[in-house]
């Protein structure tokens, strides 16, 4: 008697791999859908000049999102990144232009304060939400002291950098690709990047292996401060002047960008490439898409929230199907 071979079946391992692939592709899919919607509403926007205009503020948003991503990688949350970006903007438009050495020292000191916050949160076992919420008022007050009213001017070298127009590909796209590539390599492809992510994914195992959780927390918060400084400088390079409230909206945008890009609040699960894609999606879905749809700008936050909810719902459905 001839045995009948069983039909092809899908192993649990291949099903899980397919589910992970679908989840990783969600940020790119959401960005593609927004670009397609813009192209359908206004085909002329899909051009060199159109993307340069629509993605004008994408660079500082992407940098702020990466800054938030480092904190989330350690199972923490930073509610002060928006006001910190505003403080950096005020320093950039005043002291960094008029007294460059003093400006650099202040910005380096601000990064050091972020590192000390990481140490304080770890040593005293304090909730990062409470600590960073308190620091948001500190950064806001310092920004007002530095620049009581809107004004100042970005340094000439920063204006030239942010106004750079390379051939063929708009500068915001090149900058976004460079940010994603550098951070992805450092966090996802190096041995110390694994340690940094492990501090949020499995801190007990990391401690047993002999690594210092205090040091990893300090490094993560210092990186948050570094990219927050870069975000504030890029923002002033685009707007040319500063305001103490200029970065207040970046806190929610940064959190939404990380989550939209596949990050999770627990487990140290983050994706630098996904975070940058999430930031680009939010930048395009805010003003350009709403303008082409003739929707008032007051609905910007609602549109960003709707996109985030749709992507999270799709992620949940994929996870449930995998289980």
Image (cartoon, grey):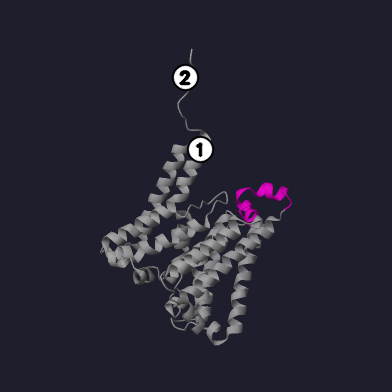
Residue 206 magenta-drawn? yes
The residue at which mark 1 appears reads as: 14
Q: Is residue 199 left or right of residue 77?
A: right
Which one is closest to the eye, mark 1 or mark 2? 2
Q: Residue at x 35, y 72 (%)?
A: 49
Q: Is residue 122 left or right of residue 306?
A: right
Give the numbered dot on residue 66.
Answer: none
Dot 1: within a 10 Å radius of its alpha carbon, few (fewer than 14), some, or many (20 or more) residues?
A: few
Tally of numbered discs:
2
Distance from Cα at disc 1 to Cα at disc 2:
24 Å
Residue 39 quadrant: bottom left
Dot 2: within a 10 Å radius of its alpha carbon, few (fewer than 14), some, or many (20 or more) residues?
A: few
Helix, strand or loop at disc 1? helix
Question: Where is residue 180 drawn, in percent x and y?
Answer: 51, 62
Q: Which residue lies most toward the right here? A: 210
- Main SS category, magenta section: helix
Label pair 1/2, CB-CB below 8 angstroms: no
Q: Is residue 241 left or right of residue 195?
A: left
Q: Which residue lies most toward the top here? A: 1
The answer to whether residue 248 is visible is: no
Question: Where is residue 138 drawn, in percent x and y?
Answer: 55, 71
Question: Where is residue 160 drawn, in percent x and y?
Answer: 47, 81
Give the numbered dot on residue 4.
Answer: 2
Q: Residue at x 72, y 47 (%)?
A: 208
Residue 50 magenta-drawn? no
Q: Which residue lies most toward the front here? A: 2
Q: Which residues are magenta?
A: 193-210
């Amino acid at each position: 008697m001839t045995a009948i071979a069983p039909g092809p079946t899908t192993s649990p391992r291949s099903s899980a791999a397919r589910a992970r692939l679908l989840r990783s592709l969600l940020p790119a899919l959401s960005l593609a859908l927004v670009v397609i919607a813009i192209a359908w509403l206004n085909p002329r926007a899909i051009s060199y000049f159109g993307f340069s205009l629509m993605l004008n503020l994408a660079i500082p948003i992407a940098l702020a999102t990466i800054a938030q991503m480092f904190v989330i990688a350690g199972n923490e949350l930073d509610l002060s990144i928006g006001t910190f970006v505003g403080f950096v903007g005020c320093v950039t438009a005043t002291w960094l232009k008029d007294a460059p050495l003093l400006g650099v020292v202040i910005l380096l000191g601000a990064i050091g304060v972020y590192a000390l916050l990481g140490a304080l949160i770890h040593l005293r076992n304090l909730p990062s939400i409470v600590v960073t919420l308190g620091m948001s008022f500190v950064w806001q007050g310092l920004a007002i002291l530095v620049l009581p009213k809107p004004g100042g001017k970005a340094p000439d070298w920063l204006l030239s950098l942010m106004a750079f127009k390379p051939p063929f590909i708009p500068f915001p796209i090149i900058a976004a690709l460079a940010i994603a590539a550098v951070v992805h390599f450092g966090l996802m492809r190096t041995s110390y990047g694994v340690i940094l992510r492990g501090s949020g994914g499995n801190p007990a195992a990391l401690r047993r292996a002999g690594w210092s959780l205090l040091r990893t927390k300090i490094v993560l918060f210092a990186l948050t401060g570094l990219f927050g400084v870069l975000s504030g400088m890029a923002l002033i390079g685009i707007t040319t002047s500063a305001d103490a409230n200029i970065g207040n909206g970046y806190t929610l945008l940064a959190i939404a960008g990380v989550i939209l890009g596949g990050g999770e609040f627990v487990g140290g699960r983050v994706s630098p490439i996904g975070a940058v894609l999430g930031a680009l999606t939010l930048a395009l879905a805010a003003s350009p898409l709403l303008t082409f749809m003739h929707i008032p700008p007051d609905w910007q936050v609602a549109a960003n929230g709707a996109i985030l909810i749709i992507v999270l719902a799709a992620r949940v459905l994929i996870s449930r199907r995998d289980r």
